Amino acid sequence: VQLQASGEGLVQPGGFLRLSCAASGSIFSIPVMAWYRQAPGKQREVVATIVGGGATNYADSVKGRFTISRDNAKNTVYLQMNNLEPEDTAVYYCHAIIRGDSRGGGSDYWGQGTLVTVSS
């Protein structure tokens, strides 16, 4: 199983960017998909999560600006980031708990980091 992220870029404050992350391989289901980020000199933090039924959760710092969504048919999670701030500059990582069959609870998988830079 692999997670492939895309959408990195440099944007000005107030701008927007959309990240995507597609899971591939032997997949039975994906109970949880999420985005994390790690800014320079800081610990990795969760940005947003979404479960299979569509319920979402956000870090307080991004509520009202970021939207997480998923396409279950494509095993893909998205992060729409609007009104970006310099403080959003970080390497963003997608994460998923993926079940390979109906028997197990699933395993953790991480995508490669994708750099988002917000600067004028």
Image (cartoon, rainbow, N blue to C red):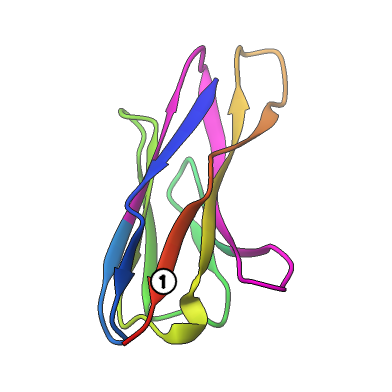
- Toward the viewer: 118 or 33? 118
Within-10-Å neighbours for mark 1: few <14, some 14–19, many 20+: many
Residue 59 in view, yes or no = yes
- Kind of residue indicated by mark 1: Thr
Q: Residue furthest front?
A: 120
Residue 29 vs residue 103: left or right? left
Q: Residue at x 28, y 86 (%)?
A: 14
Q: How many marks?
A: 1
- The residue depicted at 74 percent of the width and 67 percent of the height is 43
Residue at 41 percent of width and 85 percent of height = 85
Please give the residue where the numbered disc 1 appears in the rendered image: 117
Q: Is residue 83 above or below residue 33?
A: below
Residue occupying the point 53% across, 49% down: 113
Classify the position of the C terminus by image quarter: bottom left
**Is 80 placed left or right of 40 in the picture?**
left
Q: Quadrant of residue 46?
A: bottom right
Q: Give coordinates of residue 28: x percent, y percent.
A: 52, 17
Q: Is residue 109 magenta?
A: no
Note whether 97 is above or below 60 in the view shown. Answer: above
34 vs 32: above or below: below
Q: Secondary structure at mark 1?
A: strand
Magenta segment, which residues? 19-46
Q: As rendered, which of 61 and 53 lies closer to the eye? A: 61
Q: Position of residue 71 (x, y in %)?
A: 32, 39
